[in-house]
């Protein structure tokens, strides 16, 4: 069992974290372009940690424009084995109120305008997304958040929408009443798909900021309201992250780290050498004879 390295992708409202030993911002280049920002690395309670602000410091990337592939590649280059996504979300459930954290175990991907795979013609691969999150990592995050005093809901379906506009009332009702979704956000797809392709353990902490627009007692989503809740959520997220070293285990029963076993269909002699070279970080384990 190699060393576990935790990557945290911070969402809206979480652009840096404090308390890392030997902290420094590292510029990382990737064959998929530049990541969202430099990556803050350091040590926390004996655990190596890498923190990447998904929208960049100062919130410069819109959900559609986030360089999702570069982010995952860069984190893996830095040795990440686990990726904990920390994201703001709207809630479709009365009981999942603003300030609560939800640990989804399913996603519905309604995004349409993003690069969703590292693989393509010249090296085709199909990984399973039946269980898109790492249960062990999600449970560790749930325990850390509860220890930080947060109300946590384990399990649920995250609807990933393209944005940047919020949902219409009809969409909000459809996601909630007909599709059975629990929370909505704009960024966890294709992030979760790419983490799976890169054989990383991935889980999301979806921090509720609002009731989207379906709730009869709450008005439509309002960004000012969201930001007010985001500030409190971000403080709780920092408390949760500080407790992750005590909760992270190597107990994954889903073999997230072997997701590419039997996934690559392109015959070795038909593979595009340039693409194979670009895939070295994410898929070198199965593509490059060692
Ligand atoms: C600030 S409201 C909308 C914005 O917040 C979420 O971002 P993230 O998932 O990175 O926390 C949501 O997905 C939207 O991008
Ligand atoms: N209601 C909502 N819809 C999409 N993304 C969100 N992020 C925070 N609240 C959201």
Image (cartoon, rainbow, N blue to C red):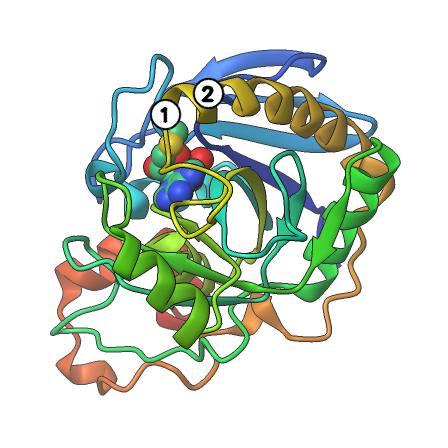
Query: What residue is rendered at 28% in x and 42% in y?
Result: 166
Q: Secondary structure at mark 1?
A: helix
Out of 279 and 244, give the one closest to the viewer.
244
Provide the residue designation for mark 2: 227
Query: What residue is rendered at 38% in x and 46% in y?
Result: 213
Residue 234 location (% of width, % of height): 60, 23
Residue 287, image quadrant: bottom left
Query: What residue is rendered at 77% in x and 42% in y?
Result: 151
**Are the two marked residues, 2 and 1, in contact with CB atoms closer than 8 angstroms?**
yes
Q: Is residue 245 visible?
A: yes
Out of 122 and 200, give the one closest to the viewer.
200
CB at disc 2 and ligand 1 closer than 8 Å: yes
Residue 60, image quadrant: top left
Q: Is residue 198 visible?
A: no
Query: What residue is rendered at 67% in x and 41% in y?
Result: 100
Q: Secondary structure at mark 2?
A: helix
Crowd band around label 2 with a 10 angstrom C-alpha radius: few (<14), some (14–19), many (20+): some
Residue 259 location (% of width, % of height): 50, 73
In the rendered image, the vertical position of residue 17 relative to residue 128, given as above or below:
above
CB at disc 1 and ligand 1 closer than 8 Å: yes
Residue 175 location (% of width, % of height): 38, 65
Provide the residue designation for mark 1: 223
Cα separation between marks 2 and 1: 6 Å
Where ligand 2 lies, by quadrant?
Answer: top left
Q: Quadrant of the N terminus?
A: bottom right
């Amino acid at each position: 069992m190699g060393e576990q390295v935790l990557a945290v992708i911070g969402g809206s409202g979480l652009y840096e974290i404090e308390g890392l030993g030997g902290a420094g911002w590292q510029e990382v280049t990737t064959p998929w372009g530049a990541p969202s920002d430099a990556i803050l690395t350091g040590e926390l309670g004996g655990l190596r940690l890498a923190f990447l602000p998904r929208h960049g410091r100062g919130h410069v990337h819109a959900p559609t424009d986030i360089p999702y592939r570069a982010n995952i590649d860069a984190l893996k280059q830095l040795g990440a084995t686990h990726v904990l996504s920390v994201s703001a979300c709207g809630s479709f459930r009365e009981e999942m109120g603003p300030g609560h954290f939800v640990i989804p175990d399913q996603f519905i991907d309604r995004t349409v305008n993003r690069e969703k795979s590292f693989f393509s013609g010249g090296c085709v691969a199909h990984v399973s997304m039946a269980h898109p999150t790492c249960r062990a990592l999600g449970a560790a995050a749930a325990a850390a958040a509860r220890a930080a005093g947060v109300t946590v809901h384990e399990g649920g379906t995250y609807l990933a929408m393209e944005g940047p506009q919020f949902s219409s009332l009809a969409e909000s009702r459809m996601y909630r009443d007909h599709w059975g979704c629990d929370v909505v956000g704009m960024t966890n797809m294709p992030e979760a798909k790419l983490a799976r392709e890169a054989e990383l353990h991935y889980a999301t902490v979806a921090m509720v900021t609002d009731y989207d627009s379906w709730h009869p007692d709450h008005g439509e989503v309002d960004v000012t309201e969201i930001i007010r809740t985001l500030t409190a959520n971000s403080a709780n997220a920092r408390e949760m992250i500080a407790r992750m070293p005590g909760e992270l285990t190597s107990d994954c029963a889903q073999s997230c780290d072997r997701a590419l076993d039997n996934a690559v269909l392109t015959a070795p002699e038909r593979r595009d050498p340039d693409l194979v070279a670009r895939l070295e970080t994410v898929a070198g384990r199965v593509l490059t004879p060692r």
